[in-house]
Amino acid sequence: MVEYPTSVTGCKNIVIVHASMQGSSPAALLDTLSKQGSVELGLQNYKLRGLATIDVNTITDAELDALHAAGVRGARLHEMSWGHGKQSGGSDIIVKVRGLASRLARLGWAIGIFCPVSAWAAMADLIRNEIDPRIKMVADHMGGTFPGEENTEDFKVFLELVREKKVFVKISGFERLYHGFESGTESVKPIATAIIKAGPDQIVFGTDWPHTQLGVSRKGKTDEERLNDIEGFREVDDTGHIRILREWIPDDEIWQKLWVKNPEKLFN
C-alpha cells in the first residue's frame, strides 16, 4: 500500500484483491488491511477493504467472522486458465459459487470471479434463481470478455444479468483483454461501453495494480516453474486507461457512480 500510486486515481477508499499467485492463505491481504490508519505509513486517511481467496470446505464460521472484522468483504475466484490445464466451465464454477454463497450470505459479502464470459452465461439461471440476494456477484475484468466476443450470445446473456442488477462489473484489466490486438484499448471499447450502458449502477473501476505478468507469458511452464519463478511487474499506463475511460463515460453522474456510489454500495 505504501507504493500504491494514489496520484493516478486520487482514491483513498480502496479494495485490495487477494492475488492468485499468493496461494490460498489470506495472510498477506490481512497484513495489508491491518495497516489501515497507520500514520507511520501515511495511511491515516485510507479506508481499506479486501476480497480473499478462501476454501469454503475447510474455513469455519468463526474464521469468516474474523476476516469480516479485519475488513474482508468478499471472496474471489480466479477461473481463467490462460491455456494452463483445463479451463473451468460454467458447471465447475457453479459448484464453487453454490458452496460460497451458502456460507457468505449472512455476511452480505461479494463473490468476485474472473472467468470467461461463457461461464457467466452458464451461471445465469443460478444467479437469477438460486443465489441469496444478500450475495453480490462481481464479474472481474469486464466479465472476461475478449475483443470479438461482444457480439456473441454469451455476452448478450451477461448484459441481461447486468441490466437486471444481478451482477456488478469491474471495468478493469484492459490490457489483459486487449493483449495481442493491434488496436489496443480501442478493441475493448465496444465491450466496456455496452456494459456501462447496460448497468450504470453496476460498474466499479479497478486498476489491477500491481500489474502481474499476463497469463500468456506462463504458457509452457511446468507447475513447479509457475510456482517458483520470480516475475517482475509490468509497466501499464493506468492514467491513460482512466483518461480513455472518461471519454467513454462523459456523463458526470455515471462517472461519480463508477468511482464512489457503486463501490460504497458493493463493499459497504
Image: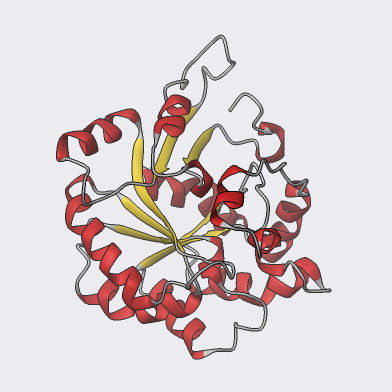
Of the 4 image quadrants, the one containing the N terminus is top right
Q: Position of residue 250 (x, y in %)?
A: 68, 62
Residue 127: image location, x then y, percent: 29, 72
The color scheme shown is secondary structure
Q: Residue at x 25, y 30 (%)?
A: 66
Whether 136 is drawn above or below 91: the answer is: above
The residue sitting at 76% across, 66% down in the picture is 185
Q: Position of residue 170 (x, y in %)?
A: 52, 58
Q: Residue pushed farthest right?
A: 182
The reply to whether residue 258 is visible in this rendering is yes
Among all residues in the image, which is located at the extreme top?
Answer: 40
Which quarter of the image is occupied by the C terminus?
top left
Q: Is residue 250 visible?
A: no
Judge whether 30 appears above or below 186 on screen: above
Vertical relation: 31 (above or below) 167: above
The residue closer to the viewer here, 243 or 23, is 23
- In the picture, measured across the screen, residue 46 lies left or right of residue 174, that is left
Left or right for 160, reference 106: right
Q: Note whether 14 is above or below 83 in the view shown.
A: above
Q: Nearer the viewer, residue 43 or 113?
A: 113
Q: Could you tell me how many numbered marks the image carries?
A: 0
Q: Is residue 220 left or right of residue 48?
A: right
Q: Residue at x 39, y 66 (%)?
A: 167
Residue 47 in the image, given as x and y percentages of width and height: 46, 29
Q: Residue at x 74, y 74 (%)?
A: 187
